[in-house]
Image: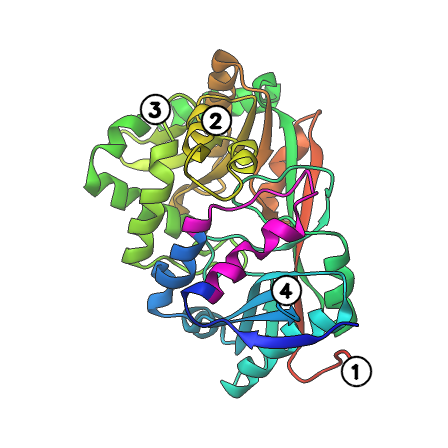
């Protein structure tokens, strides 16, 4: 007979249990990609977003064994920007049991209510930079390392609690080396000549701290008006994101578009998939996790299309055709295989670019759920 107890996560030992619980929950799942334990420890204690976000974590135990976990977060910058009073949840994992899920979700909801929040949504990260969205389609696929994976029953558990769809993100898979459609080739040539644009060097940019910071400011600005629920980056978040991304990118596969004054116009950033390497590492960098990750950095058989975009004044002017064309040429040169797009909100017109690729297929669909605090839940 189950003996469930809700406990708040306090102290390093308890936090380690929180972080390692999915290792046991997903030990027989071929698709699950574990995060490095050390990265999770840093994220949950020292992430740049914690300078302004507040959070609390809980686990449910059955006796001494952990059977579920959740993290609740309040991001005041998000609430102020969008005029909302939302608490968000993430790191939601549990066995297939409505009682366990209800205890976890109630803890997050009640805490949000105590802080004056009127709505709860998730799964989300502290800010826009982390993993978000519960998987609803594509359970047979291995996700990119920066995306969540979950069992199908998670959706039933949150819906039974009273959550409804807030939004969906979609990801597509395509042959990276096949090239862009003929129409995009023509548009790319026209745009390049009309505006006197050319390609810059990611490798050169990485050596210039001022340019790195300028790039990430531009990256933030480019998504501020087009990405659903986007939260502009702080300076500390820019430093953190630069440190995490730049070691994995190079001119080998990535593209920068510059104008005649050497100002960044647009960009396309992709990396070799490290998902299978993380599976082999099993959450640990040592003793052999680093070896698997190092090998993966030169394997483009599966490539993750991380971020692409244009500065605000260049959006909707066709420059995307330029970087897609150049990225496809580089893909052919280095022998890329499948490319997996980053999650894009299904209502974003930018996601329509993939419809031009004849061989593109839906890879994954993930969902953010939402409910009013105090509305229908288990036992009501």
Mark 4, Cα crowd under 10 Å, few <14 / some 14-19 / many 20+, is few
Q: Quadrant of residue 374?
A: bottom right
Q: Are marks 2 and 4 in contact (CB under 8 Å)?
A: no
Q: Is residue 32 rendered magenta in the image? A: yes
How is this picture coloured? Answer: rainbow
Quadrant for the C terminus, please: bottom right
Q: Earlier in the sequence, mark 2 or mark 4?
A: 4
Answer with left or right where residue 116 lies relative to residue 244. right
Between the C-alphas of marks 4 and 3, the distance is 58 Å
Q: Which mark is residue 379?
A: 1
Secondary structure category for the residue under label 4: strand
The answer to whether residue 347 is visible is no
Q: Which mark is residue 296?
A: 2
What residue did someone put label 4 on?
65
Between the C-alphas of marks 3 and 2, the distance is 30 Å
Between the C-alphas of marks 3 and 1, the distance is 61 Å
Q: Are marks 4 and 3 in contact (CB under 8 Å)?
A: no
Q: Earlier in the sequence, mark 1 or mark 2?
A: 2
Residue 378 x %, y %: 77, 78
Mark 1, Cα crowd under 10 Å, few <14 / some 14-19 / many 20+, is few
Q: Is residue 51 rendered magenta in the image? A: no
Q: Which mark is nearer the camera, 3 or 2?
A: 2
What residue did someone put label 3 on?
198
Q: Quadrant of residue 20?
A: bottom right
Secondary structure category for the residue under label 3: strand
């Amino acid at each position: 007979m189950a003996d469930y107890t809700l406990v708040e996560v306090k102290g390093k030992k308890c936090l380690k249990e929180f972080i390692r619980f999915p290792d046991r929950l997903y030990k027989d799942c071929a698709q699950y990609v574990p995060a490095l334990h050390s990265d999770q420890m840093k994220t949950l204690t020292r992430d740049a977003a914690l300078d302004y976000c507040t959070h609390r974590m809980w686990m449910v135990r059955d006796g001494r064994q952990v059977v579920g976990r959740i993290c609740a977060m309040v991001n005041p910058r998000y609430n102020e920007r969008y005029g909302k009073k939302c608490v968000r949840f993430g790191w939601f994992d549990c066995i297939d049991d409505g009682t366990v899920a209800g205890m976890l979700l109630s803890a997050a909801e009640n805490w949000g209510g105590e802080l004056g929040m009127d709505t709860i949504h998730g799964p989300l990260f502290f800010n826009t930079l982390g993993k978000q969205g519960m998987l609803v389609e594509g359970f047979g696929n291995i996700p990119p390392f920066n995306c969540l994976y979950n069992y199908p029953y998670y959706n039933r558990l949150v819906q039974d609690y009273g959550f409804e769809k807030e939004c969906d993100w979609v990801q597509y898979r395509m042959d990276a080396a096949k090239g862009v459609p003929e129409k995009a080739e023509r548009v790319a040539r026209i745009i390049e000549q009309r505006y006197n644009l050319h390609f810059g060097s990611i490798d050169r940019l990485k050596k210039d701290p001022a340019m790195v910071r300028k790039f990430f400011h531009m990256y933030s600005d480019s998504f501020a008006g087009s990405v659903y629920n986007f939260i502009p980056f702080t300076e500390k978040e820019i430093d953190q994101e630069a440190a995490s991304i730049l070691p994995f990118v190079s001119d080998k596969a990535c593209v920068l578009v510059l104008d005649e004054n050497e100002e960044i116009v647009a960009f396309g950033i992709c990396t070799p998939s490290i998902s299978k390497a993380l599976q082999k590492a099993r959450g640990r960098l040592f003793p052999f996790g680093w070896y698997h990750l190092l090998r993966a950095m030169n394997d483009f058989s599966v490539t993750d299309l991380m971020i692409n975009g244009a500065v605000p004044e260049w959006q909707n002017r066709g420059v995307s055709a330029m970087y897609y064309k150049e990225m496809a040429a580089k893909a052919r040169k280095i022998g890329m295989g499948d490319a997996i797009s980053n999650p894009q909100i299904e209502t974003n017109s930018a996601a329509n670019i993939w419809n031009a690729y004849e061989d593109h297929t839906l890879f994954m669909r993930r969902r953010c759920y939402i409910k009013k605090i105090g509305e229908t839940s288990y036992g009501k």
